């Protein structure tokens, strides 16, 4: 089989063997500027960096001014960072310091003439043990250890000191170590300076990782296991690309890619244009509202913008038409629900990995640039809003075949039941004080919009009178709610609203009724606009390269932040731009964005390949269905886990239905889901390697549960059952291979 022949797939490397032809045509290695080992090294560094950042401590809460013993501890830290001829910190220690910590501080003279309060048994901690070096950093390190003891004391008393106190202790130690290179150079002052800088860098990295909060010992086992599994999953997912890169000349790969990514114009219909326009206007509107709020514009001026830009119902309506068409196409081609879910979900999940990069990189870069936390929170809320929409839409895609069946059997009852779910879910949110009913109401609203799309596809648009009545009811209901609420409702960026909608669910329901009615009333002129060549071309580009548009939008938002905050710092000179923190922040923003842009442009999406049909083995059928079910389940868990955790913010450790999540586990879930769905697509879901990888992916969550004093029963059950099934499937697949070989012989 040659490149370009039917059945050859350069990205999955699943070409069937052609007997002697396959044996004779052994691919030769093609030299590349960057070897495969280089790419694997880059992958390892990226994965380790992700694990290090994702395992950062949560942001410490602001508890106000300290009282009692904690106030005394704060004064003692102040004394430690301003040493003098007497150990003033000893006099400031809380009365119960020794009783709480078990430490009896003393004093030692330092070589700079000061006398320091110290932790006698302390020292300069390194990965290889205490090492005070030949330049004798011992007294500053022992004083620093006493400062950390005071930070732990304040945490034990229930009121951790603010982050600036740990930062001040680290700066004091760094200053003292560099001073020793002058006071006690030992004929190697330059080496001393290098060593002091390395020790200082270790201090900063460790304190940054713990967000300058209470010094603790980080549990490395679950984190390292998670990082290893993430790298393993990425290597398995990318092995086809790596093999292609080694064996296929660049010109042939480029030709195959162009053919693969071509999107036929017939696929861009008016519903695709509607979906693209809804998402674009929603993101632009939410950004404009956030910018206006930051500038001090009152809510009384913003509500018309939020009503015009809140187009979530139209997005799910257009998505319903696309999902129904996708399911019917798979069914007509002889595929099953398994193939439908694998192909449809795989295409949707690729952007989720980009949101993971955004959630990782952008907050750190803005923190290094000293952007205010409130601004960073607003940026991340807007940047990750599409991730919530993606997660809810993924659930509607999974439910499409079942909802189509309900539509055929009981269309009116299904619509009314979904309407009841939305209303009851919204009311239960207020009654129970839990966000879960609100999430259910959001999902019900998405399904309701999808169900109305099914009705529209089969029965056409209602009459003009019905549409006018729908628009009147929707707008009238919103007006009434505004009057009863004392002012117009803000339908974007509402605090406490479901994140996928960013507004109260019932208000969005009324607005959606009005929007769908108006779209029906003005269907003819809107259809002419959708058929315009420029509009069609723009929609086709958005469907082919959605993440390129997203990264462009994100870059514009970050540029706006730079215009607002950075000029004040440039007043002191352009040297600020060349400081290490600034350079690292810019590299983090530009590097991953450029890499992601290159990857998506080079490996852009397009129509999924035709469904594969596995061998008629009962084991293959069972494993295929299970892989599809586990794939969509873990992928959805990963998407919503990322949307909830946000890398070390106050809700860094979230739960979904009792299942605890953190960024590392969320990425494992997402990659595991993508991997299993990919095996369904390429027909390898019944191999032993597939299920071995699946079982290994369950190890880090189980290790995290074992390391927790209060492990989650749900987490142990879910991952334990998955691991047990994966082990059984691995053994069954090996047995099937052995039996097949025995029959062959």
Image (tube, rainbow, N blue to C red):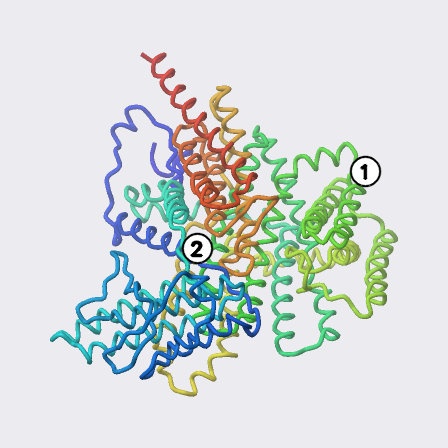
Residue 296 occupies quadrant: bottom right
Residue 548 seen in this snapshot: no
Q: Quarter-wise, where is residue 587 in the image? A: bottom left
- Left or right of 165? Residue 418 is right
Label 2's element?
Answer: loop
**Residue 180, percent from left and from top:** 22, 76
Is 480 or 190 nearer to us in this picture? 190
The furthest residue to the left? 187
- Residue at the image point whose x is 67% and y is 45% from the top: 320
Percent x, y of residue 444: 72, 46
The answer to whether any part of residue 183 appears in the image is yes
In primary-sequence order, the first of circles 1 and 2 is 2
Camera-side mark, 1 or 2: 2
Q: Relative to the observer, which residue lies in front, 658 or 35?
A: 658
**Identity of the residue drawn at 48% across and 35% down:** 681
Q: CA distance from mark 1 to mark 2?
A: 47 Å
């Amino acid at each position: 089989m040659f490149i370009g022949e039917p059945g050859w797939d350069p990205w999955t490397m699943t070409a069937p063997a052609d007997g002697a032809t396959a044996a004779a045509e052994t691919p030769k290695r093609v030299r590349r500027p960057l070897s495969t080992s280089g790419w694997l090294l880059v992958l390892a560094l990226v994965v380790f960096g992700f694990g290090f950042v994702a395992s950062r401590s949560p942001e410490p809460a602001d508890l106000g001014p300290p009282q009692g013993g904690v106030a005394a501890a704060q004064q003692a830290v102040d004394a430690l960072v301003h040493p003098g001829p007497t150990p003033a910190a000893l006099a400031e220690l809380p009365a119960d310091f020794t009783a709480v910590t078990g430490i009896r501080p003393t004093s030692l003279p330092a070589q700079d003439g000061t006398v320091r309060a110290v932790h006698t048994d302390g020292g300069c901690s390194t990965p290889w043990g205490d090492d005070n070096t030949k330049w004798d950093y011992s007294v500053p390190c022992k004083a620093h250890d006493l400062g950390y003891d005071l930070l732990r004391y304040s945490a034990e008393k229930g009121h951790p000191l603010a982050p600036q106190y740990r930062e001040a202790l680290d700066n004091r130690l760094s200053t003292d170590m560099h001073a020793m290179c002058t006071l006690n150079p030992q004929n190697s002052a330059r080496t001393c300076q290098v060593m002091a800088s390395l020790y200082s860098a270790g201090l900063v990295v460790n304190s940054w990782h713990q967000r300058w909060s209470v010094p603790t010992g980080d549990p490395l086992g679950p984190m390292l296991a998670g990082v290893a599994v993430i790298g393993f999953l990425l290597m398995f997912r990318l092995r086809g690309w790596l093999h292609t890169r080694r064996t296929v000349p660049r010109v042939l790969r480029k030709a195959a890619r162009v053919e693969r990514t071509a999107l036929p114009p017939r696929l861009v219909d008016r519903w695709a244009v509607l979906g693209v326009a809804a998402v674009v206007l929603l993101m632009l509107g939410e950004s404009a509202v956030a910018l206006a709020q930051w500038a001090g514009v009152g809510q009384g001026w913003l509500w018309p913008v939020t009503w015009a830009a809140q187009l979530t119902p139209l997005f799910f309506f257009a998505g319903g038409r696309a999902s129904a068409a996708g399911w019917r196409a798979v069914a007509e081609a002889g595929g099953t629900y398994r193939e439908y879910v694998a192909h449809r979900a795989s295409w949707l999940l690729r952007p989720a990995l980009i949101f993971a990069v955004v959630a990782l990189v952008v907050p750190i870069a803005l923190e290094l640039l000293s952007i205010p936390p409130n601004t960073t929170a607003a940026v991340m809320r807007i940047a990750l809003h599409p991730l919530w929409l993606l997660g809810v839409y993924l659930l509607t895609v999974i439910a499409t075949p079942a909802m189509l069946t309900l539509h055929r059997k009981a269309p009116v009852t299904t619509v009314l039941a979904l309407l009841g779910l939305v209303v009851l879910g919204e009311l239960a949110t207020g009654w129970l004080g839990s966000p879960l009913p609100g999430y259910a109401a959001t999902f019900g609203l998405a399904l309701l919009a999808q169900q109305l799309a099914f009705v529209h596809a089969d029965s056409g648009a209602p009459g003009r009178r019905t549409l006018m009545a729908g628009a009147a009811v929707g707008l009238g209901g919103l007006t009434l709610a505004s009057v009863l609420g004392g002012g117009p409702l803000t339908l974007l960026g509402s605090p406490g609203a479901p994140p996928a909608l960013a507004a109260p669910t019932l208000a969005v329901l009324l607005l959606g009724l009005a929007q769908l009615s108006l779209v029906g009333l003005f269907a003819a002129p809107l259809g002419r606009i959708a058929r315009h060549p420029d509009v069609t071309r723009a929609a086709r580009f958005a469907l082919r390269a959605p993440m390129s548009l997203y990264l462009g939008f994100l870059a514009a938002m970050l540029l706006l932040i730079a215009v607002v905050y950075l000029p004040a710092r440039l007043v002191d000179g352009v040297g600020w731009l060349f400081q290490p923190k600034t350079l690292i922040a810019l590299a983090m923003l530009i590097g991953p964005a450029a890499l992601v842009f290159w990857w998506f442009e080079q490996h852009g999406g397009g129509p999924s390949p035709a469904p594969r049909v596995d061998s008629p083995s009962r084991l293959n059928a069972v494993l295929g269905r299970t892989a599809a079910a586990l794939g969509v389940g873990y992928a959805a868990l990963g998407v919503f886990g990322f949307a909830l955790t946000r890398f070390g913010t106050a809700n860094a450790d979230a739960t979904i239905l009792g299942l605890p999540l953190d960024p590392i586990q969320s990425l494992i879930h997402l990659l595991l889901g993508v991997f299993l769905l990919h095996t369904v697509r390429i027909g390898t879901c019944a191999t032993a390697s597939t299920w071995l990888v699946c079982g290994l992916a369950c190890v880090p969550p189980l290790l995290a549960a074992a390391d927790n004093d209060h492990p989650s029963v749900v987490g142990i059950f879910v991952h334990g059952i998955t691991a047990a099934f994966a082990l059984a499937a691995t053994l069954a697949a090996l047995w099937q291979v052995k039996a097949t070989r025995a029959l062959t012989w």
